[in-house]
Amino acid sequence: MRFSENLPVKQKDFKMKQFIAFVNKEFLHIIRDNRTLLIIIGIPIVEILLFGFAINMEVQNIKVAFYDPTPDSVTQGISERIKQNPYFSNMGNAQSMDEMEEAMRKGKLDLAVVYQQNFQENLVHSGQAAVQLLANSSDPNRGSIAATYASAIIAGYQRDNMDLVQIPFQIQTENRMIYNPLMKSSYMFVPGIMGLVLMIICTIMTSVSIVREKERGTMEVLLASPLKHGTMVFAKTIPYMVISFIDFIIILLLSYFVLGVPVNGSLILLFLVALIYISLTLTYGLTVSTLVDKQVNAVIFSAITAMIPVLMLSGMIFPIDNMPGVLRSLSVIVPARWFIEAVRKVMIQGQGFFMIWKELLIMIGMTLFLLLLTVANTKKRLE
Amino acid sequence: MIEVKNLYKSYGRADNIIALKGVSFTVNDGEIFGVIGPDGAGKTSLFRILASLILPDSGSAIMNGHDVVKDYKTIRQIIGYMPGRFSLYQDLSVEENLKFFATLFGTTIEENYHLIKDIYRQIEPFKNRRAGALSGGMKQKLALSCALIHKPEILILDEPTTGVDPVSRKEFWDMLARLKEQGLIILVSTAYMDEAGRCDRIALIKEGEFIATDTPQGIIDNYSGVLWAVQGSRMSVILHELRAHHLIKSSFAFGDKIHITVDEGLQAEELKQYLINKNFEDVNVFPIEPTVEDCFMALTN
């Protein structure tokens, strides 16, 4: 057995060389295929421009809470009307402004109704009283609609009571959009586009590049060689990981300089979120590659199981809170949902690690699950 | 040495497509063993089992002491495998392909250059050309170089000359003859019967069974029967006429001739006159030596 004479000594070195040669080969494939290059560079730019125009949608299930330092019959009357409105769901009364802000930061609240002190007294004496509506505009569409609905209800209350008691009074509503004061829809779709582009690059490109080897017959030669399947699969993911990061940076730069979306939180944390999501989508690409044998099937399978859920169920276009119950539960297994939530929290709301650990943990869990599934499905032979 | 015993392999949901029906043979060191038969006879299934790429349903194959199922990792280090379809990276250059496969097997082009020198020298002037832009013959030379670069003990070549021009085919067989001298075991399959003579021993395969295993001359020597060639213009009409003749057992178009096997009672001159009477004036009938293809036809009829 000539081959085994000096194998143990060289083994580690040899595996590393195999790995580097494979990564190098993958990069050559990508660089030499103009279409692939176009997709990699074009997709993030096109998507950013495409989604530049946000879509208006009806908003339901607006989570509302009240802060009423001096409850009286007028404030209770207004609160009652809002609570009874089918578009709102009551989250109760807050004891302090801090409590309210905390709930909003955690995403438990869409709208806060804050009454002025001695509301009724002011109304009777000066004919004027103020109520503040704080809307969470991380999702700007939702935030603005919530505030508009509430203003309309208060105006209705005012109109009805004017007729009854014949006292001319005026309730002033003041709306404040927090987290996204300028109500830019780009704040909403930028995290969504990141989720989508990374999904396309990682899942579709990785699965196609492995399935291409099966389809063109090169997998046959690779299998008949001492190359370990793990080495091959790991080497396949490296170029796409690099490209994903480049795309992530392209989107970030375009968002910041062209769309004016701020990066309020830690940039390092944002990259950590991206790294975890990229690992997850790459692993999913590997899972897909073990399930199909043709490139076209890999694209269709990835598109149906990865891209469409990102568009429909991740909260990128349609707010998760507006979804019917079944779809809302289904959105839990869509990886992009957790990525988009985490990016919104870090990038737009400027929150720290302790506000997104749950999303990160879910994504890591999904990655491990898919990794196990891939290993279980991997074949040492052709059939 | 390769020892194959009673290999069975079937495909399909109900195992209804039987690819191999109990194939057994041995190949000695330094031997070129040809597996010859038409498309769909089971050649690729057999070679894939030997290359540890698919599992047999039953039977065993031991190559230089290693079982193709149990010791598949060792098998993958000692074989050089060339699939039927060109299976290199078309978007990589000649040199990049060779370098990649050398690294895959833990060696370098420089280390084993002497092994492939004869073959690679011919494509080296095009080493920066993409593999996809090579001609059929050059592709095969590159594929063979890639299969040889790690100094394999056994070469498994699945239809290496399919789709290659006649000159390159001859060159390819010359290369195999030189490689054999270095002690390699070469297992090669082909659908071209005229290539049988380049092998030390051949097996004729049909519908998953070896119908004969011998040296090419041994197979020809075993041919029993009277074989003639018929030559003339309007070949297809003649063929039709011959098939209607009750003393002719079989007739096949064979290049510019028709090969026929006849009953002992018939004389060549007699048949010639018979055809002339049927208005085939320029016809010629004469006895010929059988080829491997004639043997194959005789054995499968």
Image (cartoon, coloured by chain):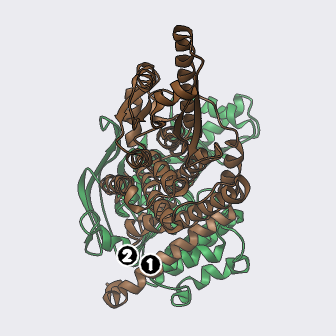
Chain colours: A brown, B green
Circles 1, 2 touching at the beta carbon (< 8 Å): yes
Q: Residue at x 57, y 54 (%)?
A: A201
Decide which of A220, A264 is in the foreground and name it.
A264
Residue placed furthest toward the front: A125
C-alpha span from label 1 to label 2 = 7 Å
Compared to residue B281, the image places residue B136 above or below, namely: below
Amino acid type of the residue that numbered disc 1 sits on in the rendered structure: Phe
Q: Nearer the viewer, residue A298 or A145?
A: A145
Placement of B56 over or under A145, stated as above or below: below
Look at mark 1 in the image and give the residue it sits on: B105
Q: Quadrant of the N terminus of chain A?
A: bottom left
Q: Residue at x 34, y 56 (%)?
A: A361
B203 vs B300: above or below? below
Can residue A140 be seen from the camera position used here? yes
Q: Residue B77, labelled with which disc?
A: 2
Residue A338 in picture, x, y percent from top left = 43, 48
Residue at 57% across / 70% down in the picture? A25
Amino acid found under the numbered disc labelled 2: Gln
Residue B72 in percent (x, y) is at 30, 67
Residue B165 pos. (x, y %): 68, 61
Q: Please, what secondary structure does the residue beneath circle 2 have?
A: helix
The chain letter under disc 2 is B
Occupied quadrant, residue B44: bottom left
Depth check, mark 1 against mark 2: the one in front is 1
Within 10 angstroms of label 2, few (less than 14), some, or many (20 or more) residues?
Answer: many
Judge by depth and name the residue closer to the eye, B151 or A250.
A250
Q: Is residue A195 left or right of residue B152?
A: right
